Amino acid sequence: MGIWIILPISLSGVSFIGCWTVYGLALRFHHICSLSNWEYNNSCLTNDNGSCCTGNHIPTISGSGTNFPENSLFSATINGASFLFVVFSIFHHAHILKCNVHTFISKCAMVFGCLAGVGAFIAGNCNPGELMFLHSLGAALSFVCICFYTVLLTFLTSRCMLTGLERFLYPIRIVFSSIQVTLTILYCIFFTQKEFYYRHISAIVEWTLSMNLELFELSYVVEFYFFSSAMLSVLLSNSDENTMILS
């Protein structure tokens, strides 16, 4: 029964380890500048040793995975995390169906979760250096859907007694979801600015968003401890019933 805790742990672990490894590689090859750097120039000398930073070196998550060789690891990380996020969304919905409460809201949350995974997949496989429009579209879809997803899952925490620990989990997830929504709005504001200072702030906000989401996902170790394979049969039987109704 407790074996399913590997899903939220793997999801958070792949995202955290993969993205920060990509950041480390990009920093090592001078493709980005450090998050602690606040000095930017309009241009650099061609023989510069890598200490000069321009607007092309702002350390956003996607900016860290733009160039070779770290772009391959970046795509692999996003692909893996996107797949696990979709599985996470579907399995959590199955858990709610087993309790037979607020199933419509749970289904809406699952849809937002799957769309967030699709958006991240698009962003991760469309290099911003070559396919900026598709990358931005995928990232925007992912950011927006994750906000809705965290809010809906937080609401479900207060309404569905899956573990008996909801009185502790609910306030924690209120904090995580509030941070996610607030920082997403701030990220959109700062990212659209032309000044390097504000764009650097947007990069810091983006990394904070990523870590906040990872902690939110990790909190579901509790629910997945009580998850069982039998709950997936509820999801499959529900799909069969819908198919029979449509036919």
Image: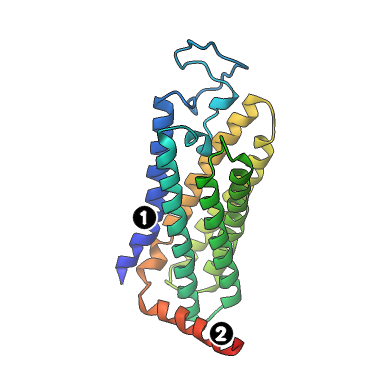
Location of residue 114 (image quadrant): bottom right
Q: CA distance from mark 1 to mark 2?
A: 32 Å
Residue 161: where, in percent of width, then height?
A: 48, 74
**Residue 80 vs residue 157, the one in the foreground:** 80
Q: Is residue 131 visible?
A: yes
134 vs 193: above or below: below
129 vs 147: above or below: above
Which residue is located at x 41 percent, y 53 percent?
80
Q: Is residue 161 visible?
A: no
Q: Please give the label number shown on residue 236.
A: none
Which residue is located at x 57 percent, y 55 percent?
146
Q: Please give the label number shown on residue 10.
A: 1
Residue 106: where, in percent of width, then height?
A: 56, 71
Which residue is located at x 47 percent, y 16 percent?
51
> Helix or strand or loop: what does disc 2 sit on?
helix
Residue denoted by label 2 = 242
246 vs 216: above or below: below
Whether residue 112 sits left or right of residue 2 in the image: it is right
Placement of the N terminus among the 4 image quadrants: bottom left
Q: Amino acid at mark 2?
A: Asn
Residue 52: where, in percent of width, then height?
A: 52, 16
Q: Amino acid at mark 1?
A: Ser
Which residue is located at x 55 percent, y 85 percent?
243
Determine contact: label 1, label 2, CB under 8 Å: no
Residue 45: where, in percent of width, then height?
A: 54, 10
> Furthest-front residue in view?
130
Whether residue 66 sits left or right of residue 112 in the image: it is left
Label 1 neighbour load within 10 Å: few <14, some 14-19, many 20+: some
